[in-house]
C-alpha cells in the first residue's frame, strides 16, 4: 500500500493486521509499526496526522480498461468449445491449437497434443 502524507511525501507500507477502522502497518525504512485510524472516510497516523492511502490493486485496475474485443474468441475456438461442452467424451481435445495467456497478457498458441482437459 502507499501512504501519502498531508505535506505531499509518500511512502510504501505493508499491512500487518487490521480491520475497517484500524490498521497496523510496517512502513518502508522505519523500524516501528505505525497505526492508521479511520474516522468516517479519513485515515490518520496514530490519530493525529491525516493521510491518504491507496492499494496496489487500485492502481492496476485503473491501468487497463477491458474492451469487448478482449473477450471475443475466434469462431473456430468457440465452435470447438461448444462441441466439447456438449460432448460426453471428456478426453476429447478442444481444438488443434488454442490460446494460452502468459503473465504479460500476450497470447501464444499451445499445441493440442501437449494439452489435457481434466
Image (tube, rainbow, N blue to C red):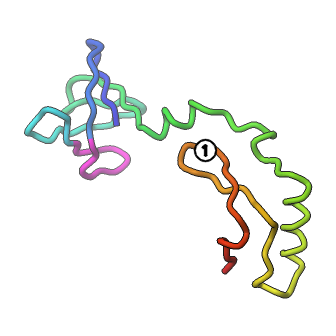
The reply, left or right, for residue 60 in relation to residue 75 is left
Residue 82, placed above or below residue 88: above
Location of residue 98 by image quarter: bottom right
Q: Measuring from the top left, give residue 30's x and y in whole percent.
A: 11, 34
Residue appearing at x 63%, y 44% in the figure: 106
Q: Is residue 24 found inside the magenta-colored segment of the image?
A: yes
Residue 8, placed above or below residue 53: above
Q: Nearer the viewer, residue 72 or 25?
A: 72
Residue appearing at x 34%, y 51% in the figure: 19
Which residues are the magenta region? 14-25
In the picture of the structure, the residue carrying the numbered disc 1 is: 105
The reply, left or right, for residue 95 in relation to residue 58 is right
Please tell me whether the stretch drawn in magenta is mainly helix, strand or loop.
Answer: strand
Q: Measuring from the top left, give residue 54's x and y in whole percent.
A: 40, 32
Q: Measuring from the top left, give residue 92's x and y in whole percent.
A: 80, 80
The reply, left or right, for residue 115 in relation to residue 28 is right
Q: Measuring from the top left, give residue 47's x and y in whole percent.
A: 21, 31
**Which corner quadrant holds the C terminus?**
bottom right
| Kind of element beneath mark 1 | loop
Q: Nearer the viewer, residue 41 or 52?
A: 52
**Which corner quadrant holds the N terminus?**
top left
The reply, left or right, for residue 93 in relation to residue 66 is right
- Seen as rendered, the residue at the extreme left is 31
Residue 83, placed above or below residue 8: below
Location of residue 81 by image quarter: bottom right
Q: Is residue 33 found inside the magenta-colored segment of the image?
A: no
- Seen as rendered, the residue at the extreme top is 7
Amino acid at each position: 500500500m502507499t501512504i501519502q502524507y498531508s505535506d505531499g511525501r509518500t511512502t510504501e507500507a505493508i499491512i500487518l493486521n487490521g480491520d475497517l477502522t484500524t490498521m497496523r502497518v510496517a512502513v518502508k525504512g522505519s523500524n516501528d509499526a505505525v497505526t492508521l485510524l479511520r474516522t468516517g472516510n479519513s485515515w490518520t497516523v496514530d490519530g493525529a496526522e491525516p493521510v491518504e492511502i491507496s492499494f496496489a490493486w487500485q492502481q492496476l485496475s485503473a491501468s487497463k480498461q477491458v474492451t469487448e474485443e478482449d473477450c471475443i474468441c475466434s469462431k473456430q475456438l468457440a465452435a470447438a468449445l461448444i462441441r466439447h461442452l456438449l460432448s460426453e467424451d471428456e478426453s476429447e481435445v478442444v481444438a488443434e491449437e488454442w490460446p494460452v495467456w502468459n503473465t504479460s497478457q500476450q497470447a501464444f498458441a499451445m499445441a493440442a497434443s501437449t494439452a489435457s482437459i481434466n
